Image (spheres, rainbow, N blue to C red):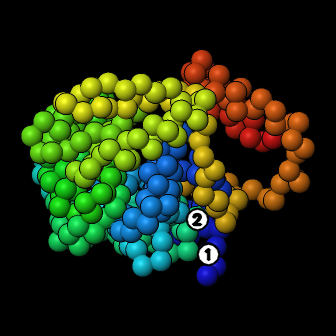
Amino acid sequence: MQFPDRSTTPGGDELPRPARLDDVKGWFRPVDQLLFDWFLGHQRDHGHAGDLLELGAYLGKSAIFMGSYLRPGEEFTVCDLWDSPAPDASNSAEMDRSYATLTRRAFEANYLSFHDELPHLVQAPTSVITSRVRAAGCRFVHIDASHLYEHVHGDIRAAERLLTPEGVVVFDDFRAEHCPGVAAAVWGAVATAGLTPLCITGTKLYGTWGDPARVRAELLGWLRTRTDLWHGVEEVAGAPLIRIDGRRAEAPEHPRSRHRAEPVTDGAGADRSAPAPAAGPAPAPPHRRTGTPRVRRLVRDLLPPLLTRALVRTFRRST
């Protein structure tokens, strides 16, 4: 199945396609990419079958990553409001503040840059998801939708119902200062609803309602082999919790795009005037790239964001 380098909005405007996962706007840190890869790979290696589910997709960065782990006979469902009206005033205010330019068409263009088919898309509040996905059918659920307590509480109840007995749920922004409702709902589920946290990173909590012993032990074994990840174990709510510092994490190999194009950032404000880049020269010899990831990390850590983006673009053109 062939896709053009550019698709169009319903109004006929072109949307450029991203050439790399890093070109897709969104928040998905290397440490969490490594953990998604480990948990989804662990399920594959142990014959744990089931569907994938993402609640809240933004422009598709983590969905693109998850879609690479879909196996024959499984279904991937993504639920998001995108450009639909929010179900209540509080959610509407949150959408206007943080996701005003989010459109389904941009998500689709991004996703189809890396995969042959779209996942099953549910454009609706996440409160409908238990009527769209079979109970006890999902092996992996990623929750990154509304940050309001009552909505997150509902998403947690839905995940418990939809996960297989050994399934894993991941919560984004469980500790961020701008969304205390997520923290309250997630830790409330740990205290009162049987959710067992397996590990935490700076932005995400990974948990299960199943028996955590084997997966925790094997995760610790893997972490001991990683020189780019610090980890420690702390007793929390009567169970060991693995804390992971991924500031030096090296991301796994990303899904590869079929396109060389500018990123799709949204459906309204993206720069559509620039043509798709022409095919570049042959890859540089390995010695040209030596040290580049370290330089980029230093740039990201030390310089202001606007200058960082300009320098990163310069690095990309030169490598």
Crowding near pointer 1: few (<14 within 10 Å), some, many (20+)?
A: few
Dots 2, 1 in contact, CB < 8 A:
yes
Between 159 and 215, the one lying in front of the other is: 215
Q: Residue at x 59, y 30 (%)?
A: 228
Q: Residue at x 35, y 58 (%)?
A: 140
Residue 251 in view (yes/no): yes
- Marking on residue 3: 1
Can you give x and y, in whole percent of width and height, for residue 209 in the image?
22, 51
| SS state under label 2 | loop
Between 265 and 208, the one lying in front of the other is: 208
Quarter of the C terminus within the rendering? top right
Between 298 and 138, the one lying in front of the other is: 138
Question: In this figure, which residue is indicated by the disc labeled 2?
Answer: 113
| Residue 96 as seen in the image, left or right of residue 259 | left
Spatial CA distance of label 2 from label 1 is: 8 Å
Identify residue type, mark 1.
Answer: Phe
Whether 175 is drawn above or below 51: the answer is: above
Crowding near pointer 2: few (<14 within 10 Å), some, many (20+)?
A: many
